[in-house]
Image: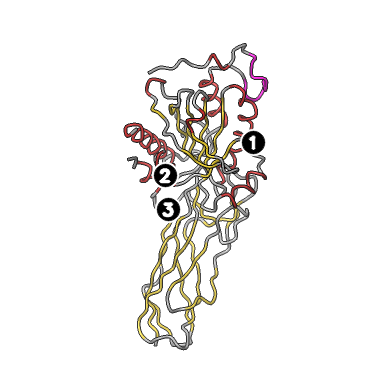
Amino acid sequence: MRQSQWWIGAVVLGVGAAFLGCGRSDYRTAEATSLKPAHERNMAPDFALKDADGRTVRLSDYRGKVVLLNFWATWCGPCKLEIPWFVEFEKQLKDKGFAVLGVSLDEGGWDVVKPYLERARVNYRVLMGNDDVANLYGGVESLPTTFLIDRQGRIASVHVGLVSKADYENDIKTLLGQDFSLLGDPAGDSAGRGAGAAESPVG
Amino acid sequence: MIRPAVGLAQRKVLSVEAPARVTLEKGGETQVTIRVKVSPGYHVNSDRPSDEFLIPLRLHWEGPLKPVETRFPEPKQERYGFAEKPLSVFTGDFEIEVRFRAPVGAAAGEAPMTGKLRYQACTDKLCLPPRTATVQFTAEIR
């Protein structure tokens, strides 16, 4: 676990540093990490947090699925641009071995977060985060910070700050091992392959 | 333990200064200019953000002087790629004017004043959590 945590922290710092030094105004590529090769991925630290209904949710509950783990807050404008994308991903891919997990870092708790979730019609599970979980993932003090976790529970990529929807789509499609368009093919099966065609676990 | 992101998280994007010392009579008033600097590329929400979920700039004081009036500058209405509407923000260098009054019953002599400026900063691509910057000056009450 210790080695895993160091790796996550290093990635967050590195991506963040590259990000802050970037003066580009578009949202593509510079901040995005490509997917790490499967054999170089480290396990995503497990955690247990409460959802809006008070149920305890563990990351390990999602083992076997590709998970988009998004740290965000209601006061974070860039985070709120991404949320409709995640709503769309959840809608189109939840039956294909994919799930979005939002972790709010709002100090105001559910009193602040629930009204926003209703307003934004968020259809995926959102959990209330805390410092312990943020620290597990390298501090996560810049928002949004999003981890893509593969079916084996390993961190495949980290995005610090706003990146493009296409970056997420490409990463998710690769992790799901499916060659369909997230936008143009809601059925998601035009390539004739199902979730079982996901990339092979390595390492 | 993880530590790397802390360095990123603690990146200082705002500084605040006040005059070292002000002098006023018991029952009298004085105006203090608070100078704020926001790092290039960052903005902080103004005291009147344009969205209910945004965290406004707030300045609170501890000490014997009572803040009678706080005047923030006119905020900028800036457009960012992540927001449909312009946001009410402060960027770069700006000043906050605070008028203080010394209570009639205040003790004569020097007293420390401490201001807490709560702010929340973002770039056009990411946001940092709300933070509090501290500013201090000495009030000499005669």
Residue type at mark 2: give it.
Asp
When the figure is inspected, residue A79 is found, relative to residue A191, above or below; the finding is below
Specify which label sits upstream in the sequence, 2 or 1: 1
Residue under circle 2? A132
* Crowd class of label 3 (few under 14; some 14 to 19; many from 20; radius 10 Å): some
Residue type at mark 1: give it.
Asn
Of the two numbered discs 3 and 1 in the rendering, the one whose residue sits closer to the viewer: 1
Residue type at mark 3: give it.
Val
The magenta stretch is A181-190
Q: Residue at left 67%, top 40%?
A: A121
Give the secondary structure at mark 3. Answer: loop
Name the mark on residue A73: none
When the figure is inspected, residue A88 is found, relative to residue B80, above or below; the finding is above
Name the chain under label 3: B
Whether A195 is among the magenta residues is: no
- What's the CA distance linking mark 3 and mark 1? 35 Å
Report the residue that reaches farthest toward the front.
A55
Hey, which quadrant is residue A201 in on the image? top left
Give the percent coordinates (x, y) of residue B10. Answer: 38, 50
Do the residues at discs 3 and 2 belong to one chain? Answer: no
Q: Residue at left 62%, top 54%?
A: B52
Residue under circle 1? A123
Give the percent coordinates (x, y) of residue B53. Answer: 60, 52
Viewer-nearest residue: B93 or B49: B49
Q: Tags 3 and 2 in contact by the CB under 8 Å rule? A: no
